[in-house]
Image (tube, rainbow, N blue to C red):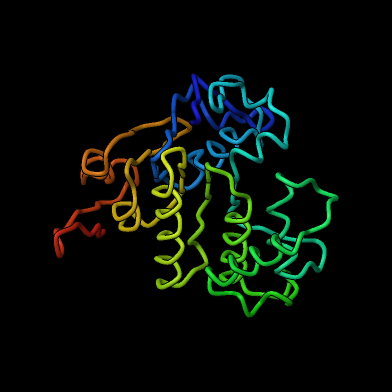
Amino acid sequence: MIELKHVSASYGETKVLDAVDWRLDGGELCVVVGPNGAGKSTLLKVACGLLPASGALLDGESVASLAPKTRAQKVTLVHQQTESVFDYTCLDFVLMGAHARSGRFSFDSDADVAKAEEHLGTMGVGHLAARPFTSISGGESQRVVLARTLMTQAPCWLLDEPTASLDPKHQIASLDLVRRHVDADPSHCAAVILHDLNLAARYADRVTIVHDGKVAHDGPVADVLTSDTLSQIYDVEIVPVPYDGGTLFVTK
């Protein structure tokens, strides 16, 4: 469980989060939405300890007080963009996800290699195992990164726009993967930043709207994703339209 208690965060003299209270519980998939520059990415960085901030707790302990390896065993962050300065193969890149459990300089076991190959296959990129990570497309790299996320075995996933470079088929496949992860164990949880409100409504147990560095709204999908709220937050008229037993969000 992650909890932020009255957390503020800044980059230099620019405050990005302002006295935020937020939590993520086991068994929960929370989708975080909001305008560009609202503080969504910073929220996830604070939650995993990448950006130290007073009041950030992980399983009741201060995130800042935990050893990096301990944090990595509990929570993993998927950035908007992942780059590598070395020509690691995609297989080696995925194997790095096991380092939180085995140590950075340990040798990869046959079991780890087999598991990494399995995860690449799960993400539909098994054919890229021997390719340099630096040579593949943005969409392919995001799927390789998700394979590495599986490799970490961390119960808590924080994902910053994991579908941004993906086509519709692989957007659904990736979010289905996140959903399965959360449902697999009561201790598992995920927070996912999305800009697609329709995907947010489809997958979220709870929605958090971040606006101007604050949690402006937080709660069940039906309570948060309303026309009045969304239109005010995004400064454009957004209308929920009933469709096939669900809801589509369209702009006017």
The vertical placement of 177 against 236, above or below, is below
Residue 123, horizontal then vertical, whole percent: 53, 69
The vertical placement of 215 against 138, above or below, is above
Residue 78, horizontal then vertical, whole percent: 59, 51
Rendered residue at 81%/61% (across/down): 85
The vertical placement of 13 against 128, above or below, is above
- On the picture, is 134 further left or further right than 198? right
Query: What number of labels is visible?
Result: 0
- On the picture, is 92 further left or further right than 167? right
What is the quadrant of residue 221 in the picture? top left
Rendered residue at 68%/27% (across/down): 66
The vertical placement of 134 against 247, above or below, is below
Rendered residue at 63%/50% (across/down): 152
Residue 10, horizontal then vertical, whole percent: 62, 29
**Most foreground residue, 249 or 218:** 218
- On the picture, is 2 further left or further right than 84? left
- On the picture, is 99 further left or further right than 178? right
Residue 195, horizontal then vertical, whole percent: 41, 54
What is the quadrant of residue 88 in the picture? bottom right
Q: Residue furthest right?
A: 105
What is the quadrant of residue 83 in the picture? bottom right
Rendered residue at 47%/25% (across/down): 20
Q: The C terminus lies in which quarter of the figure?
A: bottom left
